[in-house]
C-alpha cells in the first residue's frame, strides 16, 4: 500500500502499466490484485488513513470507540478541513490543533487523541450527516464516563477532569469542559444533576452494580424464557430419599471444588461426625454443606418466590456461614472485601456485589418454572462470586432449594461431569452463549431423576455404573441409567 508523490509518479505509472500495482483511490495504490477495493482498505484501514492524512489526530467518536462509525466514517483533527470517500471508508478531517499532551503516536504518522481530548471534542456541536455524526450524544458520553468510573474509580475521573481542564485553551473547549466537569461531579456525588444510565443512578443510590453481568443475566433469562422445562417430579417426602439425595448432594458439591473424600469416609463424617485428624477443615466443609442441603427447613423455602431482596441477601449469607463455619479465615457469612477471580475470569467487584445480586434477583424471580429459576439463581451467584470462598457450594445449594420447593428433582453434578458443568458456565460468561449451560443442567437433572434414591446401596450402585464417581476424562462420560425412566408431569 502506498500513496503516489511526484518522486514516485514515474515508478508508480510503470508499475501500474506492468500490472504490478492498481489504483484504489486518487494517488492511492496497492499491489493486491486479487481482492476488491473495500476489502483491501478494510484490512489496511489505519495505514490508508495515515497515507491520506499524515500527522492528523484520530479524535471525536472514533478515538472513544476505537473504530470507524456505523457507516465506516473515521473522524480526525488536522491542519485543514479534508473529505475523502473511498470504498468502505469515509474520511472526515476537521481543522484544529495538532497533537497535545497525552495524545499518542499511532500508525502511519497519525496520533490517537487522549481520552480527555476525545471527550471534549466529542461534546462539540456537530451535524448529523449520512446517518452518523462526529460527536456523541450526552447519553453516550455519560455511558463512557461511567465506564471509566467502573474501571478506575474516583481517582480516574478526577484525573480525566484535571487533564481536560488543562486542554481547554488549546481546544477552545470552555463549554464542553463545563459539561464534562458537571457530569463527572454528578457521578462522584459532589454535584446535583440528572443521569440517564441505570448503573450510574444505582451507584448514586448506594447500590452500584455490574452492568456487563446484568447483560449476561438478561441473556440467560431470555433463553430460559423461550426454552420449555421438563418438570421432573421427585418424592421429597420419603425419608430415605431425602437423606440419600442430601448426602450425595453434599458429597459431590464438595468433590467438584477439590474437597475429595472416598464415599465411605464422607458417610462417616456426615453420619458419625468422625473428623479425620489430618483433614479437619475439609471434613467441616462436607459437614457444613450437609447441614444446609440436608436441612428440610432450609431447603424447603423458595429464595425467589417467598422472600424479598433483603431476605435474599441474608439467606445467602446464612447459608455461606453454615457451609464455611469451619474456616474462620474465609470470613463465613461475610461478602468479599477484595476482588476474586478464576483463571481469566474476574468476578464482580466487591462494591458491586449487593447491587448486582439485587439486579439478578429481580430478573430471575420473573421466571415461572422451578428449573428456570434454579438455573438462573445458580448462575447469578456463581457469576457474582460474592464470597472469598464457597461460592459454588452456596450456588448449588440454593439452586436445589428452588427445585425442591417446586417439587422437582435436585440437580447433582457428579465428579465425572465437572468439566461439562464448568464448560457451560464459561460459555455463558465468556461467549454470552446460554444454550450449553441450560443443556448441561437439564442433563444433570435428568440423570439425578433417573437414580433410585429410596435405597442407599442401590443408589450407590447405580451411581457407580453411571461413572458418577470417576475423575473427568475425555473417554469417561456420565451415563444416564436406563432402569428408571424420567418422571414427568
Image: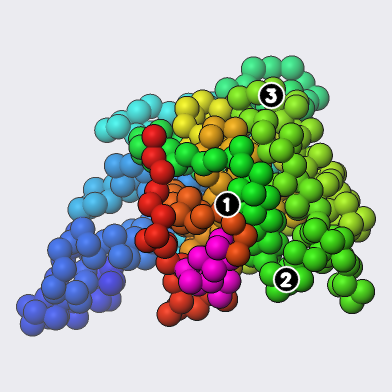
| Residue for badge 1 | 454
Q: Is residue 448 left or right of residue 115?
A: left
Q: Residue 181 sits in which quadrant?
A: top right
- The part of the chain drawn in magenta is 458-470
Q: Which residue is mark 2?
A: 264
From what the image shows, is residue 121 above or below residue 2?
Answer: above
What is the secondary structure assignment of the residue under circle 1?
loop
Between residues 201 and 322, which one lies in front from this camera angle?
322
**Can the viewer see residue 353?**
yes
Magenta span: predominant SS is: helix
Could you say where residue 324 lies in the image, as x and y percent from the top left? 83, 53
Could you tell me residue 51's position as x and y percent? Answer: 35, 63
- The residue beneath circle 3 is 307
How packed mark 3 is, by other alpha carbons closer than 10 Å (few <14, some 14-19, many 20 or more), is few
Q: CA distance from mark 1 to mark 3?
A: 31 Å
- Report the Cα–Cα distance between label 3 and label 2: 37 Å
Q: Is residue 167 visible?
A: no
Q: Is residue 85 above or below residue 262?
A: above
Q: For residue 464: magenta?
A: yes
Frontmost residue, 210 versus 163 = 210
Residue 439 left/right relative to 172: left
Q: Position of residue 114 (x, y in %)?
A: 60, 50
For marks 1 and 2, the one nearer the N-term is: 2
User: Secondary structure beneath disc 2?
Assistant: helix
Gap in angstroms between the C-alphas marked 1 and 2: 18 Å
Which label sits in the foreground, 1 or 3? 1
Q: Residues within 10 Å of mark 1 (few under 14, many from 20)?
A: some
Name the residue rendered at 25%, 69% in the picture: 4
Amino acid at each position: 500500500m502506498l500513496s503516489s508523490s511526484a518522486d514516485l509518479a514515474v515508478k508508480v505509472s510503470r508499475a501500474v502499466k506492468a500490472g504490478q500495482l492498481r489504483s484504489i483511490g486518487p494517488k492511492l495504490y496497492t499491489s493486491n490484485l486479487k481482492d476488491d477495493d473495500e476489502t483491501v482498505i478494510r484490512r489496511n484501514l489505519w495505514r490508508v488513513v495515515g497515507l491520506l492524512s499524515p500527522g492528523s489526530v484520530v479524535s471525536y467518536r472514533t478515538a472513544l470507540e476505537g473504530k470507524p462509525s456505523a457507516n465506516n466514517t473515521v473522524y480526525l483533527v488536522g491542519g485543514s478541513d479534508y473529505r475523502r470517500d473511498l470504498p468502505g471508508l469515509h474520511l472526515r478531517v476537521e481543522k484544529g490543533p495538532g497533537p497535545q499532551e497525552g495524545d499518542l503516536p499511532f500508525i502511519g504518522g497519525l496520533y490517537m487523541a487522549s481520552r480527555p481530548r476525545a471527550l471534549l471534542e466529542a461534546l462539540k456541536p456537530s451535524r448529523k450527516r449520512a446517518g452518523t455524526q462526529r460527536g456523541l450524544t450526552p447519553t453516550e458520553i455519560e455511558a463512557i464516563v461511567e465506564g471509566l468510573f467502573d474501571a478506575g474509580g474516583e481517582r480516574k475521573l478526577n484525573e480525566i477532569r484535571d487533564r481536560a481542564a488543562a486542554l481547554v485553551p488549546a481546544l477552545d473547549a470552555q463549554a464542553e469542559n463545563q459539561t464534562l466537569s458537571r457530569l463527572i461531579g454528578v457521578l462522584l456525588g459532589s454535584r446535583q444533576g440528572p443521569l440517564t444510565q441505570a448503573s450510574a443512578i444505582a451507584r448514586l443510590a448506594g447500590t452500584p452494580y455490574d452492568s456487563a453481568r446484568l447483560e449476561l443475566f438478561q441473556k440467560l433469562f431470555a433463553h430460559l424464557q423461550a426454552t420449555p422445562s421438563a418438570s421432573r417430579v421427585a418424592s421429597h417426602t420419603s425419608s430415605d430419599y431425602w437423606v440419600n439425595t442430601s448426602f450425595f448432594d453434599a458429597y459431590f458439591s464438595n468433590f467438584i471444588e477439590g474437597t475429595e473424600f472416598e464415599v465411605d469416609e464422607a458417610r462417616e463424617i456426615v453420619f458419625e461426625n468422625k473428623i479425620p485428624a489430618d483433614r479437619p477443615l475439609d471434613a467441616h466443609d462436607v459437614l457444613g454443606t450437609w447441614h444446609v442441603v440436608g436441612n428440610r427447613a432450609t431447603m424447603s423455602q423458595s429464595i425467589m418466590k417467598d422472600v424479598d431482596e433483603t431476605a435474599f441477601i441474608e439467606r445467602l449469607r446464612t447459608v455461606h456461614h453454615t457451609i464455611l463455619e469451619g474456616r474462620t479465615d474465609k470470613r463465613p457469612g461475610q461478602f468479599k472485601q477484595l476482588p476474586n477471580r478464576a483463571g481469566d475470569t474476574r468476578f464482580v467487584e466487591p462494591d458491586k456485589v449487593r447491587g448486582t445480586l439485587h439486579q439478578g434477583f429481580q430478573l430471575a424471580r420473573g421466571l415461572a418454572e422451578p428449573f428456570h429459576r434454579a438455573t438462573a439463581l445458580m448462575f447469578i451467584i456463581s457469576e457474582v462470586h460474592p464470597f472469598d470462598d464457597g461460592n459454588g457450594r452456596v450456588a448449588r445449594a440454593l439452586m436445589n432449594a428452588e427445585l425442591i420447593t417446586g417439587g422437582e428433582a435436585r440437580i447433582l453434578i457428579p465428579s465425572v461431569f465437572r468439566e461439562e458443568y464448568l464448560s457451560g458456565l464459561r460459555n455463558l460468561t465468556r461467549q454470552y452463549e446460554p444454550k450449553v449451560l441450560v443443556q448441561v443442567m437439564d442433563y444433570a437433572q435428568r440423570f439425578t431423576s433417573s437414580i433410585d434414591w429410596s435405597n442407599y446401596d442401590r443408589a450407590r450402585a447405580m451411581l457407580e455404573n453411571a461413572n458418577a464417581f470417576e475423575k473427568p476424562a475425555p473417554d469417561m462420560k456420565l451415563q444416564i441409567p436406563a432402569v428408571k425412566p424420567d418422571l414427568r408431569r
